[in-house]
Amino acid sequence: MRYLLRRLGFYVAALWAAATINFFIPRLMPGDPAAAFIAKIQQRGASVLSPNMINAVRLQFGESDEPLWIQYFKYLNNLLHGDMGISISQFPSRVSQVLITDLPWTLALVGLSVIISFVLGTLLGVVVSWRRGGWLDTVLTPLLTFFSAIPYFWLALSLVYILALSLNWLPLGGGYDTLNPDLQVGWNSDFVLSVLQHAFLPAFTIVIASLAGWMLGMRNASITTLSEDYVLMARAKGLPERRVMLAYAARNAILPSITSFGLQLGFVVAGSLVTEIIFNYPGIGFTLYTAIISLDYSMIEGVFLIIALAILAANFLAEIAYVLLDPRVRHERGN
Amino acid sequence: MQQPDIESQTSRSSNGQRNGAPAGATPGAILANGAAIQTSGEKPGEASKQTPWHDTLQVLLGNPRLVVGLCIVGFFVLLALVGPFLARQGPTTLSHDLFQHPSLQHWLGTTQRGEDIFSQIAYGARYSLLISFGAATGSTLLSMLFGLTAGYFGGWIDEVLSFLINIFLTLPGLILAVVIASFAVRGPLSILLVLLVTGWAYGARVLRSQTLSIRSREFVAAATTMGEGSWRIIFTEILPNMIAIVAAGFVGTFIYAILTEVTLEFLGLGDITVPTWGTILYWAQGDAALLAGGWWQFVPAGLCVAILCAGLTFINFGVDEIANPALRQVGKQRKKRKVVV
């Protein structure tokens, strides 16, 4: 328990660090984002901004005449109250509002894909290591290695081109069929069906691209475990093969996979955000993209914070799972 | 925070796989203990007759994965060096051949503005390789500095540095990169900076845990007794035992750097007027080339990234196998067992 508390402390500190980085990055950068932004607005609108508006924009970018540390504490205080400022690209919505509407889409898409990919990859890893050098191993291992070397967004583009554009099997993008006026947003079967249809391709992309990581990790851990004496013992006892494979070898081999879960999660989530951009998926990744294009800095910061929060939370959950799975941690790691 | 023991169980090729993972830092190479690494260069019996260089070369060339990987990377280096001279027009030169299929005139077709894609790919290779090489070198140096210092000195220095390392490990690197890049002045230097900031942590953690285990060996104690300074011990006694890990970390960061750089530029966070693999894709997306059926604007750049990264992954596998005799022995034993069966 003390171990978990200590870890919880670390994650809170990490979250604070993320917020602090978020605060200082715009202020450390050379150049003047506020000035660039004002110039951009004036170019577009061809009108001159009033001094009040210029001041407001400067405040938005964190340029104020107050001392830095006062600004910093105000910023932290605002964050604690869930206030991340006002979005410029989706004016006058608040960043937090936009994020709350986007979050369910991303959580559902990315969450489900990650779980599918983790479970499937781990199972494949177990099977492949059990018959190392078999046809499955020789075909699947290099193939998935190649897939994982492809940038997510490019894999997504290729799949869109083949499956959606050339073969016309699946929709090009979007979260649901926005062109169909009969479709009502809510919990009805048509809408759910449409959402599933639109989610399939992006989910497929994420699973394919991240499968190799989980599979290879599990494969290599399993190979090490399979040479352990207790596996030999289990076999010698004449236990059914599946039992030895899952209850003896896999259960021990999965530990490193769970340790690296948190580390890999960050990459998977980041990659899938880019995937969302390709599919115009109404989640956080797409919002991030619009924010980048329209220089909506408070939105970019908000997206970073919410993703950091999600990933830190997932990491913490993975550690709890680790403690539950590995009795050694419970007993030895009391520190 | 301290989980080197668990990490060392993660075996080798789990690294360098994930997209954008600086994971090539080869957790598996940890299995290769310092002593084992040193033996790779000198086989008993042979070493006395031949020069060590010749022998090293033989070991390197004897590993098919490494050779394949080196060939792929060599091809891209060649493309970066020679490619621009083969191109018939400059990468940003506009022509009247708009949006053409690949042909003899334009090997990889043209964009909607009439730019030659082969030319862009060749110049892009130069850019991507240089940036990624710089980022990988810088990150490796940073990770050595952090990892070795934390592992060797221990105590509160270790606490502080490990905390930093872990923070940078858990924060989502690509998103952080996007945040930094969107605030910075658009251009190659910013991309390099972003890659440096987000790329060093994984290697640092691996090196730290390895330093911890090497530190307790006798030869370090001997050096301390002889009164050698801390930095001398770190760089001349400990570091040489981790060359393979450093090399694997370098290759892994290289992969991460390429993938991240291309992604950032695809998002329009680089200098979009400079032709690179990422900006080719940025313009392809911006021009809706895919909807118009212009596959040649997408396929070459993406394939280049994928093949180059696959090549680097192969190099990592190869380095692992050479550095860690255990991996090779496992292979031999398996073959023997098969014969018996």
Image (cartoon, coloured by chain):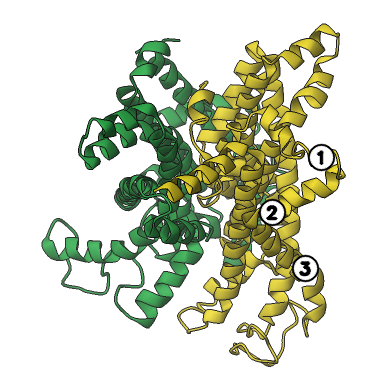
Q: Which of the two marks, 1 or 2, is nearer to us in this view?
A: 1
Above or below, A142 relative to A219: below
Label 1 sits on what residue type? Ala
What hue does chain B carry in this figure? yellow
Instruction: Give the CA separation, mark 2 to mark 3.
Output: 23 Å
Picture coordinates of residue B76 (x, y %)?
A: 71, 66
Question: Which residue is label 3 attached to?
Answer: B78
Q: Nearer the viewer, mark 2 or mark 3?
A: 2
Chain for numbered disc 2: B
Camera-side residue of B208 and A191: B208
Q: Quadrant of the C terminus of chain A?
A: top left
Left or right relative to B17: residue B324: right
Q: Are marks 1 and 3 in contact (CB under 8 Å)?
A: no
- Of pointers 1 and 2, the one earlier in the residue sequence: 1
Between B32 and B143, the one lying in front of the other is: B32
Label 2: few (<14), some (14–19) or many (≥20) C-alpha neighbours in 10 Å: few
Name the element at disc 2.
loop
Marks 2 and 3 close (CB-CB < 8 Å): no
Residue B295, horizontal then vertical, whole percent: 52, 80
Give neighbour class at mark 3: few <14, some 14-19, many 20+ (Cα, 10 Å). some
Residue drawn at x 75%, y 44% as measured from the top left: B137
Which residue occupies the foreground of this view, A85 or B112? B112
Q: Is residue A117 above or below residue A235?
A: below
Instruction: Please report the residue visible at 35 percent of the width from the left and 75 percent of the height from the top.
Output: A164
Q: Is residue B137 above or below residue A37?
A: above
Identify the amino acid type marked 2: Gly
Q: Based on the displayed image, in which of its 4 quarters is residue A91 positioned?
A: bottom left
The residue beneath circle 1 is B47
**The chain in green:** A
Which structural element holds mark 3? helix
Q: Given the image, on which type of amino acid does mark 3 rest?
A: Leu
